Image (cartoon, rainbow, N blue to C red):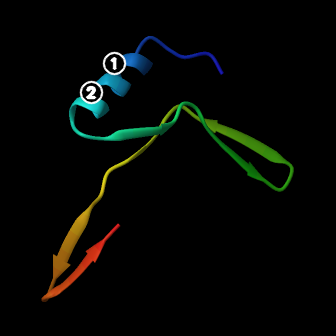
């Protein structure tokens, strides 16, 4: 997949914000269809609602 002119700008911004780039590109295969997503990133997310907490 060819990367557009914004790819590295977005990637650098995500990294500066504390995201960990886990795939570049991120490949998905569903049945006979192959997809490529520009980037995959992860950051530990926590949330709370009505006294219940989750981490994603």
Q: Within the image, what quadrant is residue 27 found in?
A: top right
State left or right for residue 14 relative to residue 5: left
Q: Which corner quadrant holds the N terminus?
A: top right
Mark 2: secondary structure: helix
Left or right? Give the position of 52 relative to 43. left
Q: Residue at x 13, y 88 (%)?
A: 51
Tell which residue pokes out farthest to the right in this image.
32
Who's the residue at 21% across and 71% down the image? 47
Where is residue 54 drawn, in percent x and y?
27, 77
Q: Say if 6 sits above or below 38 in the image.
A: above
Vertical placement of 28 versus 36: above or below?
A: below
Q: Where is mark 2, residue-wise?
A: 13
Q: Residue at the location (27% across, 61% down)?
A: 45
Q: Residues within 10 Å of mark 1 (few under 14, many from 20)?
A: few
Q: How many marks?
A: 2
Q: Which mark is residue 31?
A: none
Residue contact at pointers 2 and 1, CB within 8 angstroms: yes
Q: Is residue 45 above or below residue 34?
A: below
Q: Is residue 54 above or below residue 39?
A: below
Q: Residue at x 50, y 15 (%)?
A: 4
Task: Tell me the number on the disc at residue 9.
Answer: 1
Badge 2 density bin: few <14, some 14–19, many ≥20, Cα 10 Å? few
Furthest residue in direction top, as rendered: 5
Q: Give the spatial CA distance, label 2 vs label 1.
A: 6 Å
User: Could you say where residue 8 lies in the image, as x and y percent from the top left?
Assistant: 40, 17
Taking the view exactly as shown, the residue that stands out farthest to the left is 51
Label 1 SS: helix
Q: In the shown orientation, is residue 49 left or right of residue 38?
A: left
| Quadrant for the C terminus in the image | bottom left
Tell which of 40 and 6 is nearer to you. Answer: 40
Position in image of residue 35 (x %, y %): 69, 40
């Amino acid at each position: 997949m060819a990367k557009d002119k914004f790819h590295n700008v977005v990637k650098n911004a995500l990294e500066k914000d504390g995201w960990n780039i886990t795939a570049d590109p991120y490949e998905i295969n569903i049945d006979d269809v192959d997809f490529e997503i520009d980037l995959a990133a992860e950051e530990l997310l926590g949330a709370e609602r009505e006294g219940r907490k989750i981490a994603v």
